[in-house]
Each structure stands twice: as structure tokens, then as C-alpha cells.
Amino acid sequence: MEAGPRPDAQVAPALDGFLLRGRATPTPRQLAEVGVRADSLREVTAVEFLNAVARTSYDIVVLALVGGGVQAVLHGLKRIAEGGGARPVVVTGYVGVVYEKLADGLLLRHGADLVLANSRQDAERFRAVYEGVGADASAVTEVALPFLGGAPYTGEHDPYTVVFAAQPSVPESRKDRAHLLERLVRHARLHPEREVLLKLRSKPGEHTTHIEELPYQKLVQKLDTPPNFRLVYGNMGEVLDRTDLMVTVSSTAALESLHRRIPTVVLTDLGVRETLGNHHFVGSGCLASWDQLDAGHRPVPDEEWVSRQGVASDGSYATAFDPARERIAKLLARPGGPPPLTPYYTPATAPGYLPGILARHHLAPDGSPLPGAPAADQAPGPVRQIVRRAARGAYRHGVQRVAPVIRRMGEL
């Protein structure tokens, strides 16, 4: 979550960063890859964040959270505003491709002033969902994918470099992940003149939004890999600077690659299925198998498909966010401030769903803190900090190590 003053302020804007405490709290290394430095940065609960917003005159709050977290904060901000407090302009959206839980994720984000859609196609889909349930769709604002950039691809590097962008949760099974890894290693053996990189999103012990139960780092230990095969971490943009062929199952890295005009392949080895997310790329011209790649296939993307995906490979990326800036400016200039927050989910429209979502963040159905919720104005003491770190570590260990074992035992 981020908060700061209006973009047209006469003084240098301040950017405060808040990390919502949980299993996916980013590590310092992951934060450093973002490339944006906050003036202040601290880890908080939802209640602590809401208390901080109530005490500070933020103009804009960006909720970079999963849907349930966004919904909780929206109801908390709604309660603050109803109590007479000023509220900021609230912006949310998605970082990459939206290929699962479309209705669920969107309705949990409904109520924000701006719900950013990363492409023309997403904007149309988002509006259709909101209008289909009778909700206001005016917050949907078309922009482009937020992480694009880098120099356009100009030709092959020396050595020619193939990059496989791994994903933490796709595919899920050991068999499928082992297949992809073995084919990647086989490709390296078949083409010793190429550099073949396995690009991983997180190091062991780190987490992203999705849980990785079978890290490729472990699977690769059982293989005899050739010298031209390597594992790499770090910023995807830096890896793309030297990429000649991007390969993935359904990662948004494919869209970063297409933005730069790098030859890009979305694998069909495991089928084209909604559970894999590669169905999103139907019509892209990028679908292919490892057998085809081993034989030298180079995909040619469909230009109409690319233009609908927010990839902005035609040079329009510099102006893609102008509509969002204009909408924010109008909301900030509105007499009396932004209008009241009106999330689609309320205790009346979703009495069996909303209370549970809010309770996970220590909020009552009206957005007020539940009894015993952490207080932002009470700094945790040394003992509480140690217990908190230990509990978080135990939870992550349970999620990443113990739970998968129990599930596999249940399948015997």
C-alpha cells in the first residue's frame, strides 16, 4: 500500500509505504527490485494502516493488495469518512494478467475511485462484470501494464539467450513442473551454443502472492545440468535486456517481452487450459511446444491481439496513464472532496461473505476495528517483535513445507 499527496502539489511529494503483514509480505530484496523508494516504510495490519490514514492528510492511497485486503481497507476508509474524517482518492487494480477469479476479484475491488485496467480488453471485461451485477462501472480506468519498459529488441545477442520465466503456482503438480524443467535442460543440451536461463521469481524462503510448494530450485538439484544452463533471480527487465527467446506457461513476463518485441512463446506442452492461464494467449500467435522450439521455431505475434493487451508496443506507452492522472486530478479538485465510498459488497448485499472477509483483517461488518485489534499508536515492544517474527516464520514454514506434505499423504 502506498499513500502520498496530490500529483500537482507545489512541494515535492512524499511517498509513505505500508506493507500489509502476512505470508506474502515482501522481503528487502524484493522491495529493492521495484525501483521506487518510499520516504517511510513500515509493516502494519489493516487496522494500523487505517489509523495512520485517519491521522494523516493523504491525498492518494494506492491499494496494491489481494481482493480481500482491498475490500477490508475500503470499508475501513468508508467508516472514517462517515465519521467526519477526510478521505483520500483510492486507487487499485491488478499488476498483470487477470485470468482467474475475474468476478470475485473485481467485486472485492469495487468501491475504489479508480480500478485500473491494464488493457482495452480488461477494461471491457471489468465494465461488463460491474454492469452485469448492477454496480457502478465508472471507476474502471484503462491504462497499460504498469511494469513495461526497457529497450526494444534489436537482434540476437552473443550468446543467443533463451529464458524460461517460472511461476510459483503454475503448474502445480510435481510431474508437470518436472516435465517443464527437464525440457528446458534438454533444450540447453541440444543447443550448447545458447545460454539457457531459468528465471525464478523468489529465492527459497521468500514469497509472492501465490504460494510455491515445489520450488524449481529443489527439482533442479536432481538433474545433471549442462554448463550453459543457469538459474537467475532479480529484476525481469534486466534479464530481458539480454533475452532472445522468452518462454513461459502464462507469466506476465510474456507481455513484458512482447512489449519489447522479443520473440515470445507460451507453452502448450501441458495443454491450453484455464487452470494454467495460457488460455489468455489464444489468438496471440505465441502458443508453441518445446518440440517446436527445439526444432528452431520462432513465433510471430498477432498485432491486433497485442494491441488489445495493454502491451503498447506501438510507442503509446508514455501517454497510456494520462486518463488515470486526469481522473485523479478531477477527484482531488472536486468541491468537498471525493464522493462517498460505495463498495458493492455490504452487510445487506453479501451478509454471508463480507463479514468473514473483514474479520480476517480485524474489522467488524461496519468497518470498525474488532475488540482486541492491534493499535497503530502502540509500538510493539522487543518481545512482541520477536514473537511476531517467530509466528510469521512458523506460518510460512507450515504453508511451504508441512501443508504440501500433508496433502501428498492424503493422495496416497
Image (spheres, helix red, strand yellow):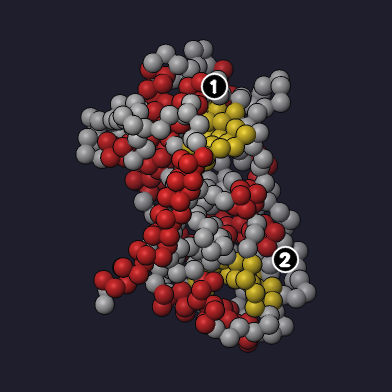
Name the residue tied to disc 1.
Answer: 56
In which quadrant of the rendered view does residue 57 lie? top right
Amino acid type indicated by mark 1: Thr
* Residue plotted at (59% across, 37% down): 41
Name the residue tied to disc 2.
Answer: 242
Image spot of residue 150 (x, y percent): 71, 54
Image spot of residue 230 (x, y percent): 65, 74
Q: Crowding at label 2, few (<14), some or many (≥20) Cα neighbours within 10 Å?
A: some
In which quadrant of the rendered view does residue 198 lie? bottom right
- Please state if 112 lies on the left or on the right of 132 as rendered: right
Image spot of residue 175 (x, y percent): 41, 78
Of 46 and 1, the residue lying toward us: 46
Q: Can you say which quadrant of the picture contains the C terminus?
A: bottom left
* Residue plotted at (68% across, 69% down): 244
Per the image, label 2 sits on a secondary structure element best described as loop
Amino acid type indicated by mark 2: Arg
Nearer the N terminus, badge 2 or badge 1? 1
* Residue plotted at (56% across, 24% down): 59
Q: Of discs 2 and 1, which sits in the foreground? A: 1
Of 253 and 85, the residue lying toward us: 85
Residue at the far front in the pictured view? 383
Per the image, label 1 sits on a secondary structure element best described as loop
Q: Tell me if I can see residue 197 in this picture.
A: yes
Q: CA distance from mark 2 to mark 1?
A: 44 Å
Residue at the far right in the pictured view? 158
In which quadrant of the rendered view does residue 75 lie? top left
* Residue plotted at (47% across, 28% down): 378
Of 276 and 399, the residue lying toward us: 399
Count numbered badges in the picture. Answer: 2
